[in-house]
């Protein structure tokens, strides 16, 4: 069977930075598929290749990469695409089209309507199967996500729809599940009898001024919290699935999300110079900190604190799981440190377990010692990029790394209070933590793990 990825947004940032490198690796590994990039920025394939693709890109990739000048709002958009796809199908008896929408969500409606028309005209030429891939964030809010989904489901079955959250393709996410469910010692302590609190920190050093047009309409809640952060929380707190199949995992993730109330305790900020060169004032939040609870039997009562955003001093992504410290109370000794699991994603993937062990030459004095797993030291530095894993799963038709529509709608419900108009937004100088992050910690009696 011939497989063709029809790359909407084929000249966009995502395609350039993530998708083409993923396609290149997969093709080099021997995966057989064609890609046709759609965009308006270049008129010809030669121009597209010379401007966008590395000069030394292997022919195993470039020979399978085509380009079509395609303006969705043009009068003859449908016939142009239909003609090119007919040509690409050639004499093949069986073809699979993978429509990959790397577009702003506001273009989904028109793209899907056009895909339906293209499909109708192509149906007769050979045996066709199809898939559609949509990027995150899926919608702008709960209402629009449902509306987009209704449109999608008129044209595709749920089996054919792949909704992306590329964090699910990241090694640390998959490791998180395996660490929890393939280790009995961890499984037994992973609940509210042992865990005191969880911190999730995702600080980035870069800003968004290069992509202001896109980010201005999105902001930190739609960009990161509704999708990546909610997915991390499900992996941290879901119960053991009956099996590690996509269906069983989704059942448990959906239970977690349904057990989270809309976020009430939150703060947002934007960095001082945001949009300074745009000629207008930009109020879009670029940083947020909040607290939530997962009200399941095993996790109720454990506060989960999250802070995430742009233009920070240091790029840092980590999850800090702090265990209760009864010994400190019983021994009346404040110097006994916490036990904790620290999952660091950036700058490198490590998992630390922090334990207290005796300091030599002391009388019963302990010191926290870290037991460390380092992904690249143990397994080498050749872990596939998230998008490579995601695209491979799409090609295979395996839905294990894709959130369900139920997960997406529950996540929109949870963040909805953070999307209201006219919420207070603190302006923070670049490279500093907004003041509210510290006040959230102070009010809740914890310190951010640094
Ligand atoms: N960038 C990332 O790192 C990233 C990461 C995760 C998810 N995403 C998601 O991926 C999607 C795309 O993001 P992006 O950053 O790649 O956006 P982008 O850089 O703004 O690219 C938008 C693409 O849409 C095309 N386009 C716009 N209007 C069109 C029209 N009328 N007809 C045909 N093509 C049209 C543009 O083509 P021309 O420029 O050629 O006109 C361009 O290729 C978004 O949903 C985003 O949330 C992005």
Image (tube, rainbow, N blue to C red):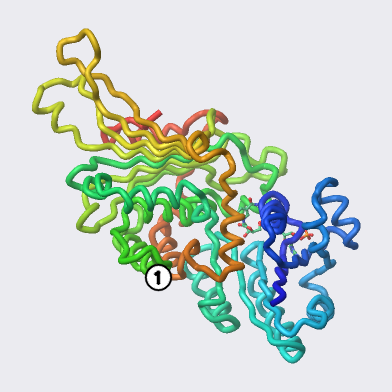
Q: Label 1's element?
A: helix
Q: Residue at x 85, y 56 (%)?
A: 48
Q: Position of residue 13 (x, y in %)?
A: 70, 52
Q: Nearer the viewer, residue 162 or 269?
A: 162
Q: Position of residue 141 (x, y in %)?
A: 49, 64
Q: Is mark 1 within 8 Å of ligand 1?
A: no
Camera sees residue 13 = no
Determine which residue is flagged by label 1. 247
Quarter containing ligand 1? bottom right
Camera sees residue 267 = yes
Q: Nearer the viewer, residue 248 or 2?
A: 2
Q: Residue at x 48, y 70 (%)?
A: 143
Q: Nearer the viewer, residue 206 or 439?
A: 206
Q: Quadrant of residue 245?
A: bottom left
Q: Is residue 47 left or right of residue 36?
A: right
Q: Residue at x 72, y 65 (%)?
A: 7
**Crowd class of label 1 (few under 14; some 14 to 19; many from 20; radius 10 Å):** some
Q: Is residue 126 above or below residue 146?
A: below
Q: Nearer the viewer, residue 244 or 235?
A: 244
Q: Residue at x 70, y 43 (%)?
A: 210
Q: Is residue 233 above or below residue 210?
A: below
- The quarter of the picture where the C terminus appears is top left
> Which residue occupies the extreme bottom position in the image?
124
Q: Is residue 222 left or right of residue 83?
A: left
Q: Quadrant of residue 20?
A: bottom right
> Which residue occupies the extreme left position in the image?
330
- The quarter of the picture where the N terminus appears is bottom right
């Amino acid at each position: 069977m011939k497989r063709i990825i029809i790359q909407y947004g084929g000249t966009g940032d995502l395609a350039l930075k993530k998708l083409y490198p993923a396609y290149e690796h997969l093709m080099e590994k021997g995966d057989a598929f064609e890609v046709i990039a759609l965009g308006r920025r270049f008129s010809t394939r030669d121009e597209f290749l010379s401007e966008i693709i590395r000069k030394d890109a292997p022919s195993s990739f470039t020979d399978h990469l085509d380009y079509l000048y395609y303006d969705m709002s043009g009068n003859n958009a449908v016939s142009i695409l239909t003609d090119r796809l007919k040509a690409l199908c050639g004499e093949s008896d069986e073809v699979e089209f993978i429509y990959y929408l790397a577009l702003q969500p506001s273009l989904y409606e028109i793209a899907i309507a056009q895909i339906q028309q293209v499909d109708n005209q192509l149906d007769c030429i050979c045996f066709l199967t199809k898939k559609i891939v949509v990027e995150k964030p899926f919608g702008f809010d709960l209402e629009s996500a449902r509306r987009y989904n209704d449109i999608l489901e008129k044209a595709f079955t749920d089996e054919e729809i792949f909704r992306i959250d590329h964090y699910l393709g990241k090694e640390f996410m998959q490791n998180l599940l395996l660490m929890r469910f393939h280790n009995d010692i961890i499984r037994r302590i992973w609940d509210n009898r042992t865990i005191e609190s969880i911190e999730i920190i995702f600080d980035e050093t870069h800003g968004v001024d290069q992509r202001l047009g896109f980010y201005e309409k999105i902001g930190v809640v739609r960009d990161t919290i509704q999708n990546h952060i909610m997915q991390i929380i499900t992996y941290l707190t879901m119960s053991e699935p009956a099996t590690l199949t996509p269906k069983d995992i989704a059942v448990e993730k959906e239970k977690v999300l349904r057990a989270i109330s809309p976020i009430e305790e939150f703060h947002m900020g934007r960095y001082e110079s945001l949009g300074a060169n745009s000629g207008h004032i930009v109020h879009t939040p670029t940083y947020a900190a909040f607290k939530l609870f997962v009200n399941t039997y095993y996790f109720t009562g454990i506060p989960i604190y999250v802070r995430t955003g742009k233009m920070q001093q240091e790029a840092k992504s980590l999850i800090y799981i702090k265990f209760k410290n009864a010994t400190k109370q019983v021994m009346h000794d404040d110097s006994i440190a916490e036990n904790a699991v620290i999952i660091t994603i950036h700058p490198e993937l490590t998992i630390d377990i922090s334990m207290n062990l005796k300091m030599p030459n002391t009388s019963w004095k302990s010191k926290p010692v870290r037991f460390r797993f380092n992904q690249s030291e143990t397994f080498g530095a050749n872990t596939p990029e998230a998008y490579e894993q995601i695209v491979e799963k799409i090609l295979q038709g395996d839905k294990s790394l894709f959130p369900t529509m139920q997960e997406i709608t529950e996540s929109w419900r949870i963040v909805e209070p953070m999307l209201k108009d006219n919420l207070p937004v603190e302006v923070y100088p670049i490279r500093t933590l907004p003041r509210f992050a510290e006040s959230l910690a102070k009010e809740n009696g914890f310190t951010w793990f640094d």
